[in-house]
Image (cartoon, helix red, strand yellow):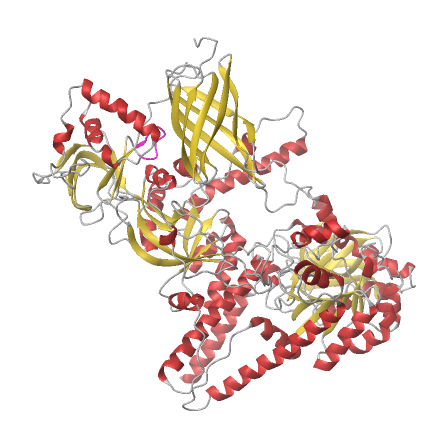
Amino acid sequence: MKKLSYFLAALVGLSMQYAMAQTPKGSVLIKNATVLTVTNGTHENTDVLVQDGIVKKIGQDIKAPNGVETIDATGKYLMPGIIDAHSHIALDVVNEATAPIVAEVRMKDVVNPYEIGIYRALAGGVTMSHAMHGSANVVGGQNATLKHRWGSTDPADIIMQDAPRTIKFALGENPTRVHGRGRGIQPRTRMGVEAILRNGFNEALQYKKAWADFNAASSQKGNTAVAPEYNERLQTLADILDGKIIIHCHSYRADEIYMLINVAKDFGIKKLVFQHTNEGFKVAPEIAEYTMGASVFADWWAYKFEVYYSTAFNAAILQKNGVITSINSDDAELIRHLYHEAAKTQRYGGMTDDEALAMITINPAKQLGVSDKVGSIEEGKQADMVIFEGHPLSSYAIPQMTFVDGVKYFDINSDEDDQRQLVSATEMVEPIYLHEETAHKCMQDTEYLFETAEALFSLNQY
Amino acid sequence: MDSEEAFISLLDHNKPSNPMRKTLLKASVLCLMLSGFISRASLFAQSDPTGKKPITSTYAITNATVFAKPGSEGSKATILIKDGVIKGVGSNLSLPVEAKVIAGDSLFIYPGFIDGASQAGITKPEDPKRPDNFDSSKPSDEIAGITPWRSAVDQFSIDGSQVDAMRQAGFTLIQIVPEGGMIAGKSALVILGDDKSTNVIKENTSLSSNLNGARGMYPGTTVGVMAKFRDVYKNTELTKNRTATFASNTGVVRPEITPTYQAMMDVISGQVPVLFEVGNDLEVRRALSLKNELGFQLILTGLEEYENVIDLLKSSGTKVLIQLAVPDDKAIKAKEGEDESEEVKALKARVKASYDKAIAQAGKLEAAGVPFAFTTIGAKPNDLMKSLKTMIEAGLSEEAALAALTTNAADILGVSKFAGSIESGKMANLVLATGPIFEEDSQIKHVVVDGKIFEYETKAKKKKEGAEGSGGAIAGTWDYTSETPAGSSGGKITIAKDGSSYSGTITYDDPAGSGAATSDLEDISYEGSSLTFSFGVSAGGMNLKVDVSAEVSGNTMDGSMIIGEFGSFPISGTLNPTLIANK
């Protein structure tokens, strides 16, 4: 009897979980494409069968099962869905800029599935993005890994629920400007940034111990132990120390990159990815040895002092040194043509097609901890794919159709002008801020902090 | 003069003071005298030298059309009220001798309206002073807007002009919520009754919360507010456990008692619900996710865009207060430009569709079977009935509209025992209208709160357009004064007649600093003796719309102006003599 009810409970539990995690899953047969698997070579005149959101079969002359739509991709290219490891689209808030460490805040709380940027990204073949907290804090908030299931109204439906937790860190000018210059508190210098990190992790160790002691004591009979204060900020740092969260750290200069590697080593942290990493080429072997890689711009720099020493060969140098390297957008416009950005590594550094494509597919998937599920076209993986007219690394490439979990969310043949999900009931013309739309948004919501600093330095807030 | 008007004139001691009404009062006294009805003083108790004490607290409103609760047909009945309680409703009541009989033959009577969440009469407390060593990354709870110990009762005044505007709109019982930050404080139930009473029915009815960050400090944004809410909630739970351990043992570390944790105790125990202010569907989901994570009782308030979560509201059984307002229809009513392209037309059609969807939401909520009530926060007091009528035209049933104003609100606030319907034993909260309440020309004539009768001026039906005002010519320069919470202010209103229409300007103290600012008058209408116009004021980055309506009599005007959502304030003016003769 007991066993039976246990079994029933498990069953009910399972079905509830299933109900919660139900996002659209599609079935489709794509015929006769040039399939760029990225991890397993390029196959011409090849069919890919997707069933219930999963790649079931890659091969020749596959017959469509009953009821499965067939798409003729003769003369076209099929590649894995592009993954942007650094983005701020589909977020209602980017920066909780008010304290040097805000590890407790969760970007999953403020995901906005209506944002048009999702559709525009799909139109550029991007099926996943890493919706990051901004770079105003040494330790920013926890990020959300998104799947671009356009048309969803529930934020939970565009969050990749089986992706591991990630968190934003930031070094250098942004946190020192916001907190040091803007508020007169630590950190005011790069040394202060390191101190914030080390103090934070040491406090987290104490916090973890206090709770471990309490839990041990409270299991004793007749104990009078009282619980320590609850602190999700320190709990999150403790989770980083326990390897439960991947750090994605905004960084530019070689010295600060090397500093964080040393801090990570001292605290036994293994899961670390560097973002931007413009001087990464100077410390490429160190990054390769100790981290999960670097996510960089192809050729974007000189927007503030710490980003002057840069080169378009950065990605290639990192890659040749064995660093897992990805190319990201950090921007709602650039995200639409990441395939061009990847192609730049061929012009500057002679990457092969697979190496260049890996930088926008399997490599960002590795950095987000989801490479077992997405990032390449392989049997058993989630069917996030893009059909291109022209090779995606050609400057004439045009994405035709974009699929997430086998469901088509973008089709150039039914690409109506007005794709907004929400339209204002009170404004005939909704204001669009061109500058904001094109500038990347790491420092969004922090403008008010710089009224004085702006006047003095007239700095860009990237 | 018919008996109803006579009755009301006798009760004018209950009227809130208002310059316009004083003027009208004079007129009505004159009217009484002319009709030979001069013995009013004899109706007041001789023991009261002020003459303000009513001789009886027993009233019988006879032969009115009574709608006892939503869905019930209006039937002719007499309502007997004694000491603020309904003693009987029916056609064969035996009326006690002390009952003041009021002929209600032409009146339509409804249960007094209930506002689920209101800030009428609420004054924002002063911001606490920041210490010299203020650190914006860890401000004190009070500075960061975490003030669960504050009570709306301390911020409430029955004398506010917003209170009168609400009462005039038919509201008798409201849940007042405090002004403040992310955890603003405790709400309370009050009646909009006599200014000699506290009018408090129940304190600590809910904990008012929202997702708004504190400006320039932690938590500054929604994402920070959600994290901080979890922190406060969980630490209150831990503090409760620590306190219990400390109380029953020796050698236990002293628990840190803070006003925040103390005030949150009855929220974590489930006795007091959290009244979460949310605007759109994404915020609804955010509040629900906090509730699911932490396990508190929840009432959602302030919903404006919720079509996409109607199913979720239904399945989660959440109590809902939707905003009693509809979107501004200016954009959809704008004139078509010349030679509009198909693309522009298509874009405009989407705005129209979006507007139509917005006003149809309440009807969809009803169809889904979610029992909702209203909040007036964020709505203009004078637009409440208009908004409701718009919702009804877009599909909300009149029954559900009345239920949202009465029985549903009573259920959500837990006051069904004594409010929400017209039944023997319930509180005497009534709305007396000149016709069926949702009909275009119906006006609220009297509002009964706790057995006290308040009278409101009903306007005659509008005359034909273009009819010259009977109050006298208005063209010229007026000096006006107005009373606002910021103090007395004034300026000049210049009106020019241009054919059959008017144009003009108004000067006022510049909200941006010293000196005077000028705005153009818009929508000037002068019919009968009623002058209405509006103008825009830009203050602190906001554009406020001010609506003025006044009665003109010779060279004076008296009336009120409604400033955005801030309420209604008295205004009066005099026309300067001009060299040009007024025709």
Q: Foreground residue, B47 or A303?
A: B47
Query: How many labels were placed on the picture?
Result: 0
Q: Is residue B365 left or right of residue B420?
A: right
Look at 69% across and 76% down and name the residue there: A198
Magenta extent = B437-444
Above or below — where is B305 with respect to A133? above
Look at 43% across and 32% down and name the residue there: B482
Above or below — where is A394 with respect to A248? above
Look at 71% across and 48% down and name the residue there: A436
Residue A86: quarter of image: bottom right
| Percent coordinates x, y for residue A380 in the rendering | 70, 70
| Percent coordinates x, y for residue B343 in the rendering | 67, 34
Q: Quadrant of the C terminus of chain A?
A: bottom right
Q: Is residue A222 left or right of residue B225?
A: left
Q: Quadrant of the N terminus of chain A?
A: bottom left
| Percent coordinates x, y for residue B575 in the rendering | 43, 19
Q: Is residue B28 magenta?
A: no
Q: Foreground residue, B207 or B507?
A: B507
